[in-house]
Image (cartoon, grey):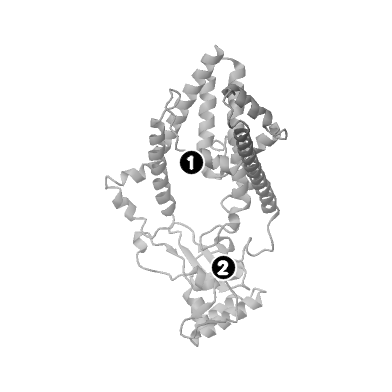
Amino acid sequence: MLERISSSFSSNTTNVCEQDFEIILQGVLKHDMWAMKIFDAWGKPLPSGILSGHVHWMGNYDECLQQMYLPTNKSFISQPINTQYCTLLSKPPLSITLGLCVPSSCNQKSIASLIEILFKNSSITENDLTCSNDPPYGQQGLARGAIITCIVLSLLILIVLSGTIVDIILSLQHQLIDSNITSNINGYNHFSDTEISEFKLIQVPQNSTSRIIFLAEFSAIRTLRRISTMKIKNNDDSFLFINGIRVLSLCWVIIGHSIAFGLSYTNNIVDVIVWTRNIAFQLIINATLSVDTFFVLSGFLTAVLFVRQIQKEKKLSFRLLILYYIHRYIRLTPVLLLMILVSINLTLYFGQGPVYPTQKGFESDDCRYVHWWTSILYIGNFINSHEMCLGITWYLHNDMQFHLYLGEN
């Protein structure tokens, strides 16, 4: 075996990789604990349950990258070779995922040559491998896009902090003014409520300009107070039944997506076919229909509010339509762009693991460099929908198009 592996690197200039593999194999033959740890971290081919869909042989990611701790000696075992964890995704029809623990000195081409020796006729190439030494963890510092995104987020956090501080100061000033007014008019009963209100307005600090008041709208305290309010609107303009529909639909969406995304890495995916015979499981496999509820609610609320606005202005004008679309675009797009910016530039730094996309994050190169503009125009579901940025935003694209279509008709 050792000769076969060594011969696989004979045409490669990465001599350090060949030497490191030989050291590891010699250590395994000698039953050295550090070498056994590296070998144990490999995904083991041909486990049980393959016919049930057990095709993810991930091995042990943490065991490969971390030092081994011996409870008996209460110490860590040092190893002479640094290792990296690589994930191999084989070609269909099985599409088996295999975890490899290999020396850090090996590049993907060398590893592919080793796999070809171990598994004859596997047709594995370096493009089928992803390693923990790949960017971003294999590079120094943050990428330029990540730095720009961090600056944008820092500015937004600064605005929120500033607004919160201003909000606290204004609240303290108003409390102080109310206290002073109460003490000044204490004992006098001839002031009317109107005169007291006018006196309060006079006492408001002159520095409470419109700009300062506008900045206070970004206060985290005000936002949390609005979100967590328990006040119930009992007027004719509110539709309280919608809240219940929203909650039930959200639960349906969350349950369906949680199971759907987990199916990609489960070891018994074939059993799903059996589960479909269960009546209760129909709630899961039909979770895609839950989104239709939000389309209906969006259309209902839009129609009601639009009719009320038309009744207020006594007519349906072109100006009203334009302002409506501009308002909706401005309300949705900045947050959408921020989420896409984070997804493109920062998600690759958010985690690590055998299946985490540490090279490119959650977005593809086509989203990053080619089709990002389709999200700004809300047409990503028409142009290369499989390369849509932030795929979960397909709902916003459809919803915007529904509003445009209904507005034209």
Find residue 274 and report its horizontal and vertical position in percent: 29, 52
Q: Residue furthest bottom?
A: 30
Could you tell me how far apart the alpha carbons at marks 2 and 1 are, in whole angstroms?
55 Å
Q: Residue furthest front?
A: 187
Residue density around tag 2, few if under 14, some if 14–19, many if 20 or more, within 10 Å: many
Q: Answer yes or no: is residue 394 visible.
A: no
Find residue 201 and report its horizontal and vertical position in percent: 65, 28
Q: Residue furthest top?
A: 314
- According to the image, label 1 marks what residue? 228
N-terminal label among 2 and 1 = 2
The one of 114 and 32 positioned closer to us in this rendering: 32
Q: Is residue 348 above or below residue 2?
A: above
Q: Amino acid at mark 2?
A: Ala
Q: Quadrant of residue 270?
A: bottom left
Q: Is residue 227 above or below residue 343?
A: above
Residue found at x 64% / y 24%: 198
Q: Quadrant of residue 52?
A: bottom left
Find residue 217 and report its horizontal and vertical position in percent: 62, 37
Dot 2: element: helix
Q: Quadrant of residue 208?
A: top right
Residue found at x 45% / y 62%: 96
Q: Is residue 396 above or below residue 276?
A: above
Residue density around tag 1, few if under 14, some if 14–19, many if 20 or more, within 10 Å: few
Q: Amino acid at mark 1?
A: Ser
Q: Nearer the viewer, mark 2 or mark 1?
A: 1
Dot 1: element: loop
Q: Answer yes or no: is residue 175 visible.
A: yes
Q: Which mark is residue 112?
A: 2
The one of 105 and 180 positioned closer to us in this rendering: 180
Find residue 271 and report its horizontal and vertical position in percent: 32, 55
